[in-house]
Amino acid sequence: ERVLIGYGEVMSIVQDWELALAVVWWRTTRKHRSRPSGGFDTARSQKEITRLETAFLRKTAQEIREEIAPHLEHQAADDLEGLMHERNRLAHRFLRERANDDRQFEPGTHDELIALGNRFMSSLGSVMRTIGSFEDYKVPVPEHWPGTAERIMERVVRGQTIPRDPRLQ
């Protein structure tokens, strides 16, 4: 049970790490990097968000790594390939690899999860510093954005999904 709880906690960190990498990719590959996309509730921004999501999902892990690595802190960029490998291992085979014939986990499994979680957390901190260093948008922020952002963050913290329909945000 302890291993499964640790596994869930680590995978939550991994998902945050993946989202942060996607934000770096988005901010560094957009045509107009320092311009807001117009808010989630405009036709233009909906189109841009959909286009960027589609483009991101078509990328291989190696392509994403190559595109974002120059924008990351040196250590985070160096760790990217190994962490992507560990992410795939965690997502697809870690629990099976660490289980024995008695349907128990091998000794040290929980400790390995903690070590992996620490690696992902350290990288996440570095990626978040990169995001924090991005230049601010150079245009006025529409009045409704701060409230929408606050509601979206409340949903994220509660583990709720973000509705695509702006009226439900």
Image (tube, rainbow, N blue to C red):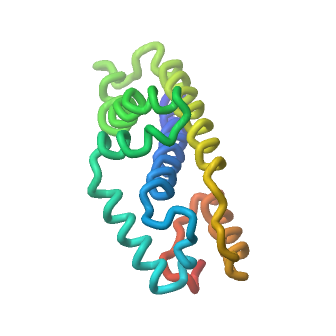
Q: Which residue is at a point 43% across and 71% down the rendered structure image?
A: 49
Q: Which residue is at a point 52% across and 66% down the rendered structure image?
A: 161
Q: Name the side, left or right, on which 34 lies relative to 103.
A: right
Q: How many marks?
A: 0
Image spot of residue 167 (x, y percent): 58, 86
Vertical relation: 134 (above or below) 2: below
Give the quadrant of the C terminus.
bottom right
Vertical relation: 22 (above or below) 109: below
Along the viewing direction, whichever of 134 and 115 lies nearer the viewer: 134
Q: Name the side, left or right, on which 160 lies relative to 60.
A: right
Q: Name the side, left or right, on which 168 lies relative to 15.
A: right
Q: Which residue is at a point 42% across and 57% down the rendered structure image?
A: 29
Vertical relation: 157 (above or below) 39: above
Q: Which residue is at a point 52% across and 26% down the rendered structure image?
A: 75
Image spot of residue 74 (x, y percent): 52, 29
Vertical relation: 46 (above or below) 4: below
